[in-house]
Image: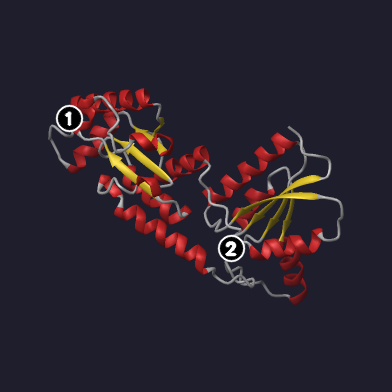
């Protein structure tokens, strides 16, 4: 579905709050009358995976609407900026457009330090970040089930399928409140999603894993135990997948994925990236 002729999407991309990118866009676009703009903010883009996620979002916007998106970037890292610059968009980079000519004129390299360009750290973003981490730590491993309504996402799966490290990655890198719940022997034998999870099916992402890899991981923790045996792992994975399929829970196979890849897939599939305006 194409945009109206005079409507464009603007992406504000920054390794900090994005206020400099927004100010730059407002200044430049004030010279063009008769346009409507849909704003999309992507703040704290400070890893390659986040930059790739934004690039994918830009590409998808172009595919859906047809018009060339406008991208205003204050990314400092050249590698991150290259990822954004490779999209089929009109990319205005503060550093490429303004800093590089200054470096040439002044005959000195800029500091290329994240956050230097007049962007003060916004206490609100910092608070959200800390809140997400604290929530995730307090809601790890099914410790609490009465705060699922406050979670952005709930990871469910058998023991040692990467729920805890993924939740922590989501909190620390994306400021996402991530809870997790391990399916116990009792849960698996019941053949139903635990009652505490049923009201929040729309928030749940099931993590599954190949039994042989699960056995190898558990073997490191409890060598030669029934818990780590391949037979136990096969049974638990089969039961867990059946429960989640029956409940309509979407699943992600973590077998061949790093924690970072699992987290990024969850963020993309659930559209969890927080746009800070």
Residue on which disc 2 sits: 17
Number of numbered discs visible in the structure rendering: 2
Label 2: element kind: loop
Quadrant showing the C terminus: bottom right
Front-lying residue, 277 or 98: 277
Foreground label between 2 and 1:
2
In the rendered view, does 167 fall on the left or right side of 195?
right
| Badge 2 or badge 1: first in the primary sequence | 2
Q: Residues within 10 Å of mark 2 (few under 14, many from 20)?
A: many
Label 1: element kind: loop
Q: Which mark is residue 171?
A: none
Residue on which disc 1 sits: 229
Provide residue 145's location: percent of width, then percent of height. 29, 45
* Figure check: 7 above or below 110: above
- For image coordinates 62% across by 54% down, the residue present is 41
Determine if residue 127 is in view: yes
């Amino acid at each position: 579905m194409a945009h109206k002729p005079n409507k464009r999407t603007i992406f504000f991309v920054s390794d900090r709050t994005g206020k400099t990118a927004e100010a730059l866009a407002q200044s430049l676009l004030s010279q063009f009358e008769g346009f409507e703009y849909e704003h999309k903010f992507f703040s704290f883009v400070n890893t390659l995976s986040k930059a790739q996620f934004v690039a994918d979002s830009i590409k998808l916007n172009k595919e859906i609407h047809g018009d060339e998106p406008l991208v205003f970037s204050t990314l400092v890292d050249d590698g991150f900026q290259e990822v954004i610059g490779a999209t089929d968009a009109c990319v205005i980079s503060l550093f490429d457009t303004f800093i590089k000519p200054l470096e040439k004129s002044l005959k000195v390299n800029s500091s290329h330090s994240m956050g230097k360009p007049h962007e003060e750290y916004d206490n609100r973003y910092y608070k959200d970040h800390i809140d997400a981490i604290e929530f995730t730590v307090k809601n790890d491993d099914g410790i609490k089930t009465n705060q699922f309504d406050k979670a952005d996402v709930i990871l469910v799966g058998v023991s040692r399928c990467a729920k805890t490290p993924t939740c922590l990655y989501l909190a620390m890198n994306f400021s996402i409140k991530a809870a997790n719940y391990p399916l116990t022997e009792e849960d698996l034998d019941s053949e139903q999603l635990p009652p505490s999870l049923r009201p929040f099916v729309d928030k749940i992402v099931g993590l599954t894993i190949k039994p042989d890899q699960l056995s190898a991981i558990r073997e490191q923790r409890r060598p030669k135990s029934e818990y780590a045996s391949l037979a136990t792992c096969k049974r638990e994975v089969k039961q867990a997948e059946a429960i989640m399929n029956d409940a309509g829970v979407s699943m992600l196979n973590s077998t061949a994925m790093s924690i970072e890849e699992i987290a990024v897939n969850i963020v993309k599939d659930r559209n969890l990236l927080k746009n800070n305006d």
